[in-house]
Image: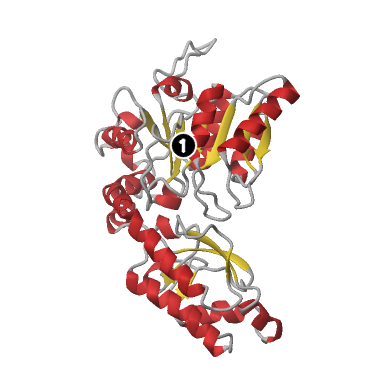
Amino acid sequence: MEPIIPGIQVRSREEDYINIQPIQAAGRLTLEARKALISYGDGYSVCDFCLRPFRLDKIHKPAINQFTLDLAEFLNMDEARVVRGARRAFQIVVNSLVEKGETVLVSSIGHYSLALAVESRGALWREVPLNEENIVTSEDVASKIDSIKKESGSLPKLVAIHHVDYQFGNLHPVAEIGKVCRDYGIPFLLNGAYTVGTMPVDGKKLNADFVVGSGHKSMAAPAPTGVLAATEEYAAKVFRTTKAEGDVSGRKFGIKETELLGCTVMGAPLVALMASFPKVRERVKNWDDEVEKVNYFTQEFLKIPGNKVLSELPRKHTLTKVDTTETFGKVSETHKKKGYFFTNELSKRGIVGPFPGATHAYKINTYGLSWSQIKHLSESYLDIAREYDLI
């Protein structure tokens, strides 16, 4: 296939293969989003009808204003904005609530971008340890809060915990964690990068003050897109508007939101996120089917003696960490292609996703696969194992 231009190949992974890459599965675009990319690809395409008060979330054609309201309703929060990825949402909240030298409590497997957001503010991040099942518990959150209070004399200014973590794909008891935060009077940020757009997320039921989502990870949208939703109590802080004016010009900037730097995601990424939203809103209702499929796969996967699932079982999420060290990893020790033999074997069967050479611990994501694809994926693992006399 001819390249688009030299150095940029046509990407046909989603069309030609079953893709189980862990961060790509729930970001596959809908057909509507692909159309939106073409139609709104010009740089300032959404600004055709940017009329007073000249703010992105007030534009009515395309209906960004209504989309913003729909997002808040979807998450059962009071206000929402589209931002440049989940990491930018972390930074907005940290900048709004935390001062230099203060503390934010995160998980010991929290995403690195959250830690960087805290560090960039000159604040400190402290970690809640995992229990033996690799879960953050509400009891451990309370214990760490008490420890920080005893050590520093102050409570953390923010607690930020993942709904589902990116290391194991485990589901954490965030409603209980949020309740602990309420008891201490500490705002709670729910990192829903792997759940907003794939499974039902009710921010208020989960006791969250902030819900963060990732458009390109879990909402069938291009990068960089993310969602930040807040309760009424905190919306005025994170979405506060500018108050300053120029000392020479006397300029003011109206209702521009300070932490959002006025406008955030514009053009094709935003409209593609909007275009996928009707299907995203419907697909979360089918979450039980997605969980059933991943549990079918793991049951078949474990029929290969020596294979391990490092995530919690039965699975509660489609992102799963597996270990094939004692099976395909053993084959790689003597195979002339080393670990690349395994990903080559998958590719021959129309499957991509694991990093080339992966035969030890790695992650996959079955989200969005049909039953026929799930069964083909499962049988492919078994077929490769038979070919190399592992079963």
Q: Nearer the viewer, residue 100 or 152?
A: 152
Q: Is residue 94 above or below residue 37?
A: above
Q: Is residue 48 above or below residue 51?
A: below
Badge 1 marks a residue whose secondary structure is helix
Task: Check disc 1 and give the amino acid type.
Answer: Ala
Residue 48 is situated, as x and y percent measured from the top left of the image, at 28, 36
Q: Is residue 228 above or below residue 303?
A: above
Q: Quadrant of residue 122?
A: top right
Q: Which residue is mark 1?
A: 175
Residue 190 is situated, as x and y percent measured from the top left of the image, at 49, 37
For image coordinates 58% across by 48% down, the residue present is: 135
| The C terminus: image quadrant | bottom right
Q: Nearer the viewer, residue 139 or 168?
A: 139
Q: Is residue 21 left or right of residue 47?
A: right
For image coordinates 35% across by 27% down, the residue present is: 78
Q: Is residue 240 above or below residue 197?
A: above
Residue 160 is situated, as x and y percent measured from the top left of the image, at 56, 35
Tell me the colour scheme of the image. secondary structure
For image coordinates 34% across by 34% down, the residue present is: 76
Q: Nearer the viewer, residue 63 or 186?
A: 186
Few, some or many C-alpha atoms within 10 Å of disc 1 (few <14, some 14-19, many ≥20)? some
Residue 117 makes an appearance in the image: no
Residue 328 makes an appearance in the image: yes
Residue at the far right in the pictured view: 151
| The N terminus: image quadrant | bottom left
For image coordinates 30% across by 23% down, the residue present is: 52
Residue 386 is situated, as x and y percent measured from the top left of the image, at 53, 87
